[in-house]
Amino acid sequence: VRSAVAIEKETPENERPETFLRQSDGGLVSSSSSSGPGSSVRARFEKMIRDAQDSVCEAIEAADGGGTFKEDVWSRPGGGGGISRVLQDGAVWEKAGVNVSVVYGVMPPEAYRAAKGEGNSGAKAGPVPFFAAGISSVLHPKNPFAPTLHFNYRYFETDAPKDVPGAPRQWWFGGGTDLTPAYIFEEDVKHFHSVQKSACDKFDPSFYPRFKKWCDDYFYIKHRNERRGLGGIFFDDLNDYDQEMLLGFATECANSVVPAYIPIIERRKDTPFTEKHKAWQQLRRGRYVEFNLVYDRGTTFGLKTGGRMESILVSLPLTARWEYDHRPKEGSEEWKLLDACINPKEWL
Amino acid sequence: VRSAVAIEKETPENERPETFLRQSDGGLVSSSSSSGPGSSVRARFEKMIRDAQDSVCEAIEAADGGGTFKEDVWSRPGGGGGISRVLQDGAVWEKAGVNVSVVYGVMPPEAYRAAKGEGNSGAKAGPVPFFAAGISSVLHPKNPFAPTLHFNYRYFETDAPKDVPGAPRQWWFGGGTDLTPAYIFEEDVKHFHSVQKSACDKFDPSFYPRFKKWCDDYFYIKHRNERRGLGGIFFDDLNDYDQEMLLGFATECANSVVPAYIPIIERRKDTPFTEKHKAWQQLRRGRYVEFNLVYDRGTTFGLKTGGRMESILVSLPLTARWEYDHRPKEGSEEWKLLDACINPKEWL
């Protein structure tokens, strides 16, 4: 699905609009109309991610107790836009970004057919318009014992191709939440994974084991044969369940971010540390940069298609470090983290 | 040419061999035989890059006055290998890597045909063995007024395909030397470029203007619309000149590294600086990481084909920094550097 798609340049806005949807998608509809176009999945997903952005930012500011988010609002001429919020150099977090975006684009017909699971044999079709909306966040704390968190939930929908009668609209959900500590505290990792499992289990008992493995497979730094962190859940191209059910699942996952993460931060944000702990955190931040710039689909796709660069790269840590051929001493706390990144564990 | 090529895992060696060439390529030949296989271009290129590694490392250690290079030697079962030398946390350089490597590999026939400038219409051919040798170096100083230097010179040769009678052996040279300061000192940049131009002019007056532009085009960070630094020279796939002439040119370029760079380091290594200067250097180091991990062919190709990861990533700085939406004040020294990265200048 991620073939050549180019999107327009964004323009800054002074105010948050009520919605980034095109009017034809339910934009600018009064809130009193309960069954109007505002009840489309597009509109409900946008509302969900914007509510999630508000509640996560509120929780982060409260836990930080010092920093505040700076907001940038932007739109694109043909519809869509986004809100980037960044808290930099706070008391607890050195860099925390929470972004939402709504994108209208056009994909090549081959990508539409690939998404439908068809080959190139179909009738000759033109480019297919698509809609994508998502929330994406990376939170890098200062304290080396406090873990980095990443989460991202997104919804994708094509129009029904107009020139191929009967060809259906395609849609899918993707996302996940994962934890990247520099040091392992078993109670933290167990807590984090148990919140993910609870969210999954409300919808399907197969979700947690399947999405936990998907996460371990996805956040893999191939050239190092290690994962970026200790995982969580990840899923993509999910459309083989009821659409309402998956919208509910994505909402539950987004609502689980604060209870999964903030209690860990409260426990670790003031733990005393040394230069040695900080240097190891910085080396692991280097791995984070390697994964995001070399492998992460959202980052590489976003940079290549002309997405808003500053919003995409807010995922990078404030600082990172690379030492030649660094190897932690076997049995050390640093080695234990590395071992768990090389050999993913079942935490529950 | 850079299609699916996988190379074997390297094994560490305790000693530097006299040559990494296969015996059939002139390896293990006594130095008394003057016209033996040791006079092949493969053998002479290996000797040139190993001599250059020695002389550059010697000059770096002398200028550093504190740090020493740590050496790793490695080989591959089917022939080839390399020597990685890294000076870390010296008095002047925070990280300096100078690597040579010799690789024997096998490329798909399509890649061979593409290199020859042919389509897929040729006779059905099998995989084509190739030979590649190169020196690659990145030198990151500590002082924010002392620039980073990169250089890389490489020689590539295929065997004549055995199953297509008459199909020729292919060969080409590639490489370049470029300067990446965080602050502009015109006399430094002029000195650097003038040494590059002198090396070029000894061979062809068209080389400097052509390879200067090629360098500006190559080290381009597309998602930021800026170059990584202030350029130098860069060329690739060069085979439309006499082979002896190009071997001489690559040798001249490698020999120009020390006179182009060390005088600049001597001038800047002890310049007093503030936290603000250091932070800007760190932001520019972040750009260096972005270019190398997202765009640099050597890095992305090396990581994907299973090259020696630690040797490849020694190009990354010891530390780097990313701030959200950082914009230097117009007219400031930081802005001047950024402007020269956005709008490449003629320095001579």
Image: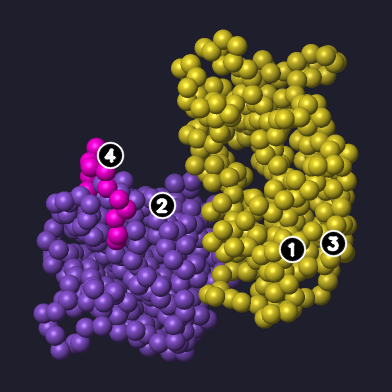
Chain colours: A yellow, B purple
**Picture coordinates of residue B272 (x, y %)?**
50, 78
Side of A95 where B267 appears, left or right: left
In the current view of this chain or complex, which residue is farthest to the top? Answer: A165
Q: Main structural element of the magenta stretch: helix, strand or loop?
A: loop
Determine the chain carrying the residue at label 2.
B
Tag 2 residue: B4
**Three-letter code, disc 4:** Asn
What segment is highlighted magenta in the picture? B116-130
Dots 1 and 3: beta carbons under 8 Å?
Answer: yes
Residue drawn at (70%, 34%) of the image: A238
Q: CA distance from mark 4 to mark 2?
A: 17 Å
Tag 3 residue: A188
**Three-letter code, disc 3:** Asp
Q: CA distance from mark 2 to mark 1?
A: 35 Å
Q: Are marks 1 and 3 on the same chain?
A: yes
Mark 3 closeness class: few <14, some 14–19, many ≥20 residues within 10 Å: many
State the mark number for residue A181.
1
**Picture coordinates of residue B295 (x, y %)?**
44, 53
Side of A333 where A76 appears, left or right: left
Quadrant containing the C terminus of chain B is: bottom left
Of A9 and B103, nearer the camera is B103
Q: Nearer the viewer, mark 2 or mark 3?
A: 2
